[in-house]
Amino acid sequence: MVTGSIGAGLLVLLGVRKEDAELEAEALLEKLLGLRVFEDAEGKMNLSLLDTGGALLVVSQFTLYGDTRKGRRPSFDLAAPPEQANRLYEHFIAKARERGVETQTGVFRAMMSVSLTNEGPVTFLIETKNG
């Protein structure tokens, strides 16, 4: 069963830290919407998601905050608890939709199979000041 699917746009694997609040979610959204990562007519990364009319597929991803610096088992101490993470995940999605961006989602805290067709090998890690 497919719960979210987009054409051209960005797949956002959204991780939430304990220190994050609405301000960080909104700053992250603004950064993503304005990030010039799509090609213009000359093939240069010069266009934003807003410029291209692209969509967002937002998937919650607490494992982004798995700390592997010690030992062999990741520590998830930096990740926000589920209630906080879900609230900020939903806030991020609502703000994106308020901006008029087509926004599809995964299912929070669910085991999902996520497929991606990536043009280029272009992946960015974007963090807020708390990251």
Image (cartoon, rainbow, N blue to C red):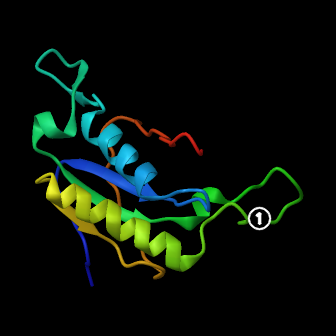
Callout 1 amino acid: Ser
Neighbour class for label 1 at 10 Å: few (<14), some, many (≥20)?
some
Give left or right: position of 41 versus 110: left
Percent coordinates x, y for residue 41 in the rendering: 10, 19
Residue at image coords 30%, 41%: 30
Seen from this angle, which residue lies furthest right? 71
Quadrant location, the N terminus: bottom left
Secondary structure state at the residue bearing disc 1? loop
Where in the figure is residue 24, as x and y percent of width and height?
45, 50
Residue at x 26%, y 34% (from the top left corner):
34
| Quadrant showing the C terminus | top right
Closer to the camera in the image, 112 or 20: 20
Q: Quadrant of residue 105?
A: bottom left
Q: Which residue is mark 1?
A: 75
Residue 2, placed above or below residue 34: below
Is 28 situated above or below 121?
A: below
Q: Considering depth in this image, is 104 or 116 the residue closer to the camera?
A: 104
Horizontal side, residue 16 vs residue 54: left or right: right
Viewer-proximal residue among 121 and 12: 12
* Relative side of 27 to 20, left or right: left
